[in-house]
Image: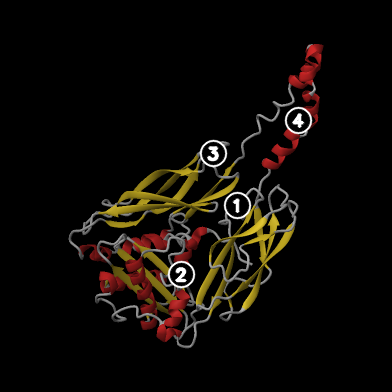
Amino acid sequence: MIRARSFKYLALCAAFGLSLAACASPAPAPVAQAPSATPPAGPPQRGLAVVAGLQVAAPSAGAAAVQVTVAGELGDACTELADVQTERTGRTFVVTINTARPAGAACAAVVKAFEKQVSLDVSGQPAGDYVVVANGVSGQFTLAGLEPTASPLPPTAAPTEAPTEAPTEAPAASPTPAAQPTQAPAPTVAPAAANCLNKAAFDRDVTIPDQTVLTAGQKFVKTWRVQNAGSCVWQGYQLIFDNGDKMGAAALALPMPSVQPGAYVELSVDMVAPAEGGSHIGRWQFQTPAGQRFGLSVPNDGLLWVWIDVPYSGNAAAAAPAASSGGGGGGAGACGSSRNSAGEADLLAQINSIRAQNGLPALNLNAQLNEAAWRHAQDMACNGINSLNPHRGSDGTQFKDRVFQAGYPGSAARSRENVYYGGTPADAMDWWLNSQIHRENILFSTAVDIGIAYAVRPGSEWTNYYTLVFGVP
């Protein structure tokens, strides 16, 4: 069953914690300023702010907005906060805080703390738990339902006064006794149902665990086991396709059996593996009879996933599009992008220095992994960033697909990838080392090889695009 995962890699591929002591090591590297000197003038360099934490103010019942305070650091004296973007996927709010600095500026390495207030629009959203992710750091809040303050009003003195006022008003009183039996139960039943909480909890994959390898066109049944973790009875509810790959599902809205609060249920969907090779992910949620969708409990992102891998055909690697004009880099690429070899060499030196400080051997620069890294860095420069999964290329490939297609003789399944966009190599290293999952990739103990790509496209949204690929023979 698909594990409902946090946004740590679907949204921004990072889960920032508090600053780590080892993260200070890249700061003195003056070489990191070199790439910014390439264009002496031009549009400001954009980047992502390093976020250390966030606080969410508890919203009142019926609130139209939720206030979030985001705290973090700016890397040098020239870097300033730029625009803030927000988007909502299901019950997850993704906040992206961007930075800007003058192109080619030589700035003092003075770290500046910042706090940014962000308002999230929650008007019309159903009661329940929600997740906020700001540049990889997550928090949560709960929207409470409105109290049924008007419910006690119907059974007032009106029904009792009608028979006692005047006998001449008997005709007017005749509808009143008829209304009395219907008014009494209404206030007690309806508000109770409206105020219950809809929430699910993932238990386990019954069939097809994540990254199961299936052949193209193979029929399969995906089964999740979930718990009714809320207080509502699931009666007349549906399992609904949300986004991603439908994988030939015959129906995108499937009726669910009745499930009492606290009980478990197995939910199955008949699917077919796509003909296209690569990774395929489909996401599903739940829906009430009133059409309100809900998902899994915090801190997960509210979605059930089905994730399969379909092998490429024997000629897939040969048919893969050429990624660069030379594995070593430095030359012109597609869409006016170029490869910054000096920046790549600087990153390799910093990575191997960090590994040495942690008692790990240096990584070897590998031509095939270099090609896989360049393919994705150039793709981001030319075609933009996939906002839900920055590791997914515009052609639908994931990093394991690109490692396989590049012909790396090691294990594509055990490869790992870091990406970053905007800023200098020092900014990229600071981001990776302050993100637990990306730091673990840099300190991947069994990795032997690495591919590094630094693509530059002046005038594009982020200017600088970075990809690291770690390989195990």
Closest to the observer, 277 or 248: 248
**Residue at numbered disc 1:** 293
**Residue at numbered disc 4:** 183
Q: Nearer the viewer, mark 1 or mark 4?
A: 4
Q: Is residue 37 left or right of residue 328?
A: left
Q: Whole-percent x and y of residue 110?
A: 29, 52
- Residue at image location 43% in from the left, 50% down from the top: 86
How packed mark 4 is, by other alpha carbons closer than 10 Å (few <14, some 14-19, many 20 or more), is few
On screen, 234 above or below 267?
Answer: above
Locate the N terminus and report the quarter of the image it occupies.
bottom right
Q: Nearer the viewer, mark 3 or mark 2?
A: 3
Q: CA distance from mark 3 to mark 4?
A: 33 Å
Q: Nearer the viewer, mark 3 or mark 1?
A: 1
> What type is the residue that disc 2 sits on?
Asn
Q: Secondary structure at mark 2?
A: helix
Label located before the other in sequence (1 or 4):
4
On screen, 419 above or below 120?
Answer: below
Q: Secondary structure at mark 4?
A: helix
> What type is the residue that disc 4 sits on?
Gln
> What type is the residue that disc 3 sits on?
Pro
**Residue at numbered disc 3:** 59
